[in-house]
Image (cartoon, rainbow, N blue to C red):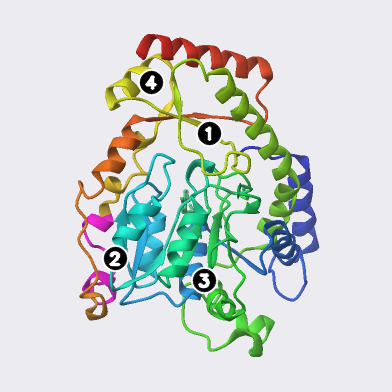
Amino acid sequence: MYKIGQKELDAIGEVLFSGKVFRYGIGGACTNFESRYAQYLGVKHVLMTSSGTTALVAALIGQNIGPGDEVLVPACTYIASAIAVLAAGAIPVVIDIDESLTMSPAAAEAAIGPHTKALLPVHMWGLPCDMDALMAIARRRQLKVIEDACQCVGGGYRGRKVGGIGDAGAFSFNYYKNMTCGEGGAAVTNNDEALPRMGCMVDCCRFYWDGRQANGTPFVSSGSRASEIEGAVMNCQLDRIDDMIAKMRAQKTRILAETADAGLKPLKANSLDCECGTHAGFLLPSAEHALAFQKIYPCTIAGKTGRHVYTEWDPIFAKQGAHHPALNPYNLKENADCRRDLTKDQCAASLDILNRSILVGTHPDRSEDDTSKIIANLRQAAEQVL
Ligand SMILES: Cc1ncc(COP(=O)(O)O)c(C=O)c1O
């Protein structure tokens, strides 16, 4: 959680005392956030959900992804990206990242097989993927692109906001994200035809509340509707995001500039001017260098977070794709020809990059003096380790 204050408290109080916490029929806080966020992102449709995971599932199902389909997922992401693919009934195929810590376009192109239906690039740690290259591949090979922008709320790529560049996108508003309402998310798309299916995933009873006509043929899903309390908080958070991002980006720019002669190699940036700036990252010569650096300066090693690397995805290795074997996508005959096996060394090149990558977090409330101290410490650690 980056910033929360009196405005959020007042907005929650207003909703609670109004007695209107259910989002339908009042044109209230959720509807307002959805239209404001759509405008902010430059997309046609935004649907608030209860989490980033459910937003990803809705985004995938909106694009008709399901049994028989493979979706390419990067080796570095939170497990939810792969889980969402399985929740849609499809199979995640894990592929390499590059030195930007995001999906490698070359690996994506090489991994496309006869059952591949979509790419799921993940804008990790506020760092946008190489969307021009990925979109070009997807269009040429007739694949869908579902952007996982859960960790890149407020971020952009070459002048456009992430999440709205592919066919659909998903955001998380959980506690750790740039905008938060505790738990929450949003699924987005420009595609009118995707909307009824996406909406049905978010709330399969939606047709009772906002019309049978607009909602296509409903199917059964588990509900992930947002409440007006979340909508109210998100409207306040949206007012804060640009200022926060500008401050974090400026901090990152300063860290990069003032460590440029310290022998530290910055991670490859796909769109430095537009990214979130939540982390400055450096690629060290070896995993040993990264560990030694971390001992002197307590930074994050990208490969050691315990949850953002495919090797940590226990249910995927165990092929436990559902609560019941008959519903498990790994057992479905439609998926028999998909590439269902994942091995720990499948993306060895990614592991090498991740174990060499150190990340230094920024914060919108950090003073210039504190940033100076961080820079001095980074320089000192570099001097000792490199
Ligand atoms: C890259 C990524 N994708 C998806 C998710 C899932 O979001 P949520 O926790 O809101 O379900 C997260 C959450 O941390 C994430 O980091």
Q: Mark 1 — residue?
A: 279
- Measured as percent of width and height from the top left, residue 89 is found at 35, 73
Viewer-closest of 272 and 343: 272
Whether the residues at callouts 2 and 3 have beta carbons within 8 Å, the answer is: no
Ranked by sequence position, the earlier of labels 2 and 1 is 1
Q: Quadrant of residue 92?
A: bottom left
Q: Nearer the viewer, mark 2 or mark 1?
A: 1
| Amino acid under disc 3 | Gly
| Amino acid under disc 4 | Gln
Viewer-closest of 50 and 196: 196
Q: Which residues are magenta?
A: 315-331
Residue at (58, 18) in percent of width and height: 258
Q: Mark 4 — residue?
A: 294
Q: Is mark 3 within 8 Å of ligand 1?
A: no
* Mark 1 crowd level (few <14, some 14–19, many ≥20, 10 Å Cα): many
* Mark 3 crowd level (few <14, some 14–19, many ≥20, 10 Å Cα): some
Of the 4 image quadrants, the one containing the N terminus is: top right
What separation in Å lies between label 4 and label 3 (alpha carbons)?
A: 42 Å
Ranked by sequence position, the earlier of labels 1 and 4 is 1
Whether the residues at callouts 4 and 3 have beta carbons within 8 Å, the answer is: no
Q: Mark 2 — residue?
A: 321
| Amino acid under disc 2 | Gly
Q: Mark 3 — residue?
A: 223
Ranked by sequence position, the earlier of labels 2 and 3 is 3
- Measured as percent of width and height from the top left, residue 144 is found at 46, 69
Q: Quadrant of residue 225?
A: bottom right
